[in-house]
Amino acid sequence: MAGSAGSAVQRLWAALRAGGPETGWLDRLVTSALIVGLLATARPPAGWVWACWGVTVAGWVLFLAGDRRWRGTAQVGLGVAAVAAALTAGADDDTGLVLTFVVLAMFTALPSSPPGLSLTVVAAGTALITASELAMGAPVTRVGLYVGIAAFTTLTGLYRRQFHLRAVETAQLLELTRGAQAERARAAALDERTRIARELHDVLAHSLGALGVQLELATALLEDGDSDRALDRVRRARRLAADGLDEARAAVNALRTDALPLPEALAELAERHGRDHLGAHARVEVRGATRPVPAAVGVSLTGAAREALTNAARHAPGAPLRVVLEYRPDSVALTIANGPPPRPPVPRSGPPGAGLTGMRERLALVGGRLRAGADGQGWTVEAEVPV
């Protein structure tokens, strides 16, 4: 129903923009036929009445000619037609009276006619009807009836005019709404592309940069004839490539599941972490009343959780992990804590990671902050983003 109504309004607005008549073809045809019928059956007593009706017809023809493109000309034509017909309202034949009411109804229904101008023309026509009837000796009750008919005709025309204007405003509002929706979709697409680019950059930039450094060092050592140290650098480069590939896969998986609510995304991340790292069980706890958060906030917190879990697997393998998502009144906080590892971690060679720096930068983009540090024999990372 809403779609069909919107289509109808849109077609109406398109017709108006194409230069169609303001009052519709049917109204113009019916009114023209009524004017011709009245004049064909009229028997006025004086020749000046025919002259006034001739002016009325000329004004109506001027309206028909100018209603399509020259709205001011159309208003002038209808005004002249109404005044000329009102001058003959007191004649023995009631043709002039009916003509006046017909033209006034059409004039007040014009959407482009200001309400003040419409009321002025109606008042002038009513005054001429009253003066003409009283001059011809008509009783006051009859004059009052004609004034009431003029008022009813005016109200009917104004109602039609208001209905037409509301239809046009609705069509304009529909166009503006569609334009705003298109711009919002475009902005969302650009934001999504920026987010994906940032995720891939955060994952790959560090790994590929460190990989390039190790390969350059290996090349230099081979040129110097130090094959043992060059082999060690190649092994480091291989480990960096494997770690970068794992991080890239994790980032792609996070992007694919970004549409999930934040608690479900964290639960899936913890489950996948447990599968990838044997013995590393992460328990997810949600506190507070859950509510939707912006996509950028969800991505930032999910990325921070992924990085924190990866760091815990590297530096505290097998340690118990606790992931706490807390919905606060004006923010969302995420805490990832690990206890002491059951065994010392295997020393890793190579350049130090930049995981905490990447997390801080990602959270800063959405107005969040990060706190990380030792907590007894374990390590705690806490991220908080205002929403």
Image (cartoon, rainbow, N blue to C red):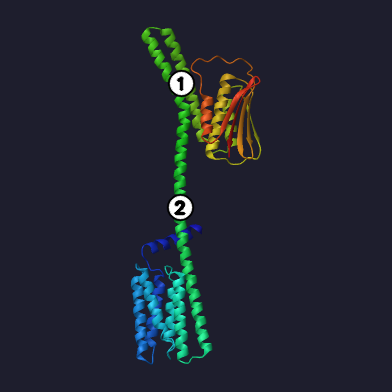
Residue carrying label 1: 241
Q: Which amino acid does label 2 sit on?
A: Arg
Q: Residue 171 carries which label?
A: none
Left or right placement of residue 9 versus residue 318 in this view:
left
Of residue 268 and residue 373, the one placed in the foreground of this image is 373
Of residue 206 and residue 244, the one placed in the foreground of this image is 206
Q: Quadrant of the C terminus?
A: top right
Q: Position of residue 379 (x, y in %)?
A: 62, 23
Residue at image point 56% right, 38% down: 260
Q: What residue type is labelled 1?
A: Ala
How many dots with numbers? 2
Residue at image point 47% right, 35% down: 195
Element type at mark 1: helix
Above or below residue 145? Residue 230 is above
**Quadrant in the picture for residue 132:** bottom left
Q: Residue 277: tell me if it is visible.
A: no
Of residue 336 and residue 240, the one placed in the foreground of this image is 336
Residue carrying label 2: 178
Left or right placement of residue 306 versus residue 97 in this view:
right
Q: Do the residues labelled 1 and 2 touch (CB within 8 Å)?
A: no
Q: Position of residue 21 (x, y in %)?
A: 38, 68
Above or below residue 95? Residue 203 is above
Q: Position of residue 372 (x, y in %)?
A: 59, 25
Q: Residues within 10 Å of mark 2 (few under 14, many from 20)?
A: few
In the rendered structure, which disc, 1 or 2, sits on the residue that comes first in sequence?
A: 2
Left or right placement of residue 116 versus residue 310 in this view:
left
Above or below residue 131? Residue 193 is above
Q: Position of residue 381 (x, y in %)?
A: 60, 27
Element type at mark 2: helix
Per the model, the C-alpha gap separating discs 1 and 2 is: 47 Å
